[in-house]
């Protein structure tokens, strides 16, 4: 399994770069991951990231964009604003989770 | 002492610079089962940053007609893919039963009903277009249509809008 170094930390990742170990992530790493993809985290971003982490822990899988809206309460348009172009993937990456597998 | 060069971190490629990809989905069917492929793919494309247009024509017009969009139906009749005896399809009540079952199956996987799905698609940046000819044929106007439909356009307008787009006909 590939390992990459971000901000002097070694993290396990899959072939695309998403984290594979849930416990290797922390909020400091999130800031580094976000800056790797050109995003600066605001409170609004954190609300999403914390929901993702909690929901992953509860459900065992990364929530889809729809779930973040319906269960997490953050409007879809807002998500596209915070994580432009590919919101579901960017959110998952910054939150240290696998890409969502669900279709909707 | 040797100094090791740190390799650049492996980061997923999100291809933010590439903004030219475009998808157009023509929805020409009005049954419940045939409404979903277009919706699911439009939603997926939008989630990948693809500019997406949906064009509703003929029976697909029902997907955006206020009076019908909540009431699309599914029947096993004429559809041997259901593996049910065809005679069953003709029995009164079977369409309602099959529709209810399909709606349940769709809801069980967390997929929304057609109107909610269209709202999500528009919130994600998708464009909904109604076919001029279908509007004329069915004598419907903009007021009869889902509020999020951007306009009633002709076939020529559609061809202009989808210059360079990948096309999907359902």
Image (tube, rainbow, N blue to C red):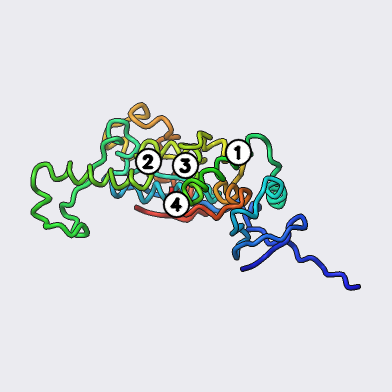
Distance from Cα at disc 3 to Cα at disc 4: 10 Å
Distance from Cα at disc 1 to Cα at disc 3: 17 Å
- Quadrant for residue A27, please give it: top right
Q: In the structure shown, which secondary structural element does the residue marked by tag 2 occupy?
A: loop
Q: Which mark is residue A102?
A: 4
What is the quadrant of the N terminus of chain B in the image?
Answer: bottom right
Q: Which mark is residue A67?
A: 3
How packed mark 3 is, by other alpha carbons closer than 10 Å (few <14, some 14-19, many 20 or more), is some
User: Which one is in front in this view, the residue at disc 1 or the one at disc 3?
Assistant: 3
Residue at the disc numbered 2: B112
Distance from Cα at disc 4 to Cα at disc 1: 21 Å
**Residues under numbered marks 3 and 4 in contact, where contact means CB atoms less than 8 Å apart:** yes
**Residues under numbered marks 2 and 3 in contact, where contact means CB atoms less than 8 Å apart:** no
Rendered position, A86 above or below B124: below
User: Left of B104 or right of it: where is B19?
Assistant: right
- Quadrant for residue A47, please give it: top right
Residue at the disc numbered 1: A81
On the same chain, marks 1 and 3? The answer is yes
Position of residue A17 measured from the top left corner of the image (x, y, whole percent) = 63, 60
Distance from Cα at disc 1 to Cα at disc 2: 22 Å
Q: Chain letter of disc 2?
A: B
Position of residue B152 measured from the top left corner of the image (x, y, whole percent) = 40, 36
User: Left of A44 or right of it: where is B125?
Assistant: left
Distance from Cα at disc 4 to Cα at disc 2: 13 Å
Q: How many marks?
A: 4
């Amino acid at each position: 399994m590939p390992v990459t170094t971000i901000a002097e930390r070694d993290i396990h990742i899959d072939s695309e770069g998403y984290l594979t170990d849930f416990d290797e992530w922390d909020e400091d790493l999130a800031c580094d991951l976000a800056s790797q993809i050109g995003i600066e985290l605001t409170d609004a971003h954190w609300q999403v990231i914390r929901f993702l982490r909690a929901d992953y822990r509860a459900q065992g899988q990364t929530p889809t964009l729809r779930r973040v809206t319906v269960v997490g309460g953050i409007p879809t348009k807002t998500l596209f604003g915070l994580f432009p172009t590919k919101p579901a993937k960017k959110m998952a990456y910054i939150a240290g989770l696998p890409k969502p597998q669900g279709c909707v | 002492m040797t100094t090791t060069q740190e390799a650049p971190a492996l980061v997923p490629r999100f291809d933010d610079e590439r903004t030219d990809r475009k998808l157009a989905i023509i929805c020409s069917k009005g049954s419940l089962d045939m409404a979903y492929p277009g919706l699911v793919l439009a939603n997926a494309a939008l989630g990948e940053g693809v500019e997406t247009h949906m064009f509703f024509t003929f029976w697909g017009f029902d997907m955006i007609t206020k009076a019908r969009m909540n009431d699309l139906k599914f029947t096993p009749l004429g559809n041997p893919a259901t593996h049910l005896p065809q005679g069953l399809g003709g029995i009164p009540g079977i369409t309602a039963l099959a529709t209810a079952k399909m709606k349940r199956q769709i809801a069980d996987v967390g997929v929304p009903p057609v109107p909610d799905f269209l709202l999500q698609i528009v919130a994600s940046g998708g464009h909904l277009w109604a076919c001029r000819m279908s509007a004329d044929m069915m004598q419907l106007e903009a007021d009869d249509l889902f509020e999020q439909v951007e306009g009633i356009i002709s076939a020529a307008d559609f061809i202009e809008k989808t210059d360079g787009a990948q096309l999907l006909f359902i």
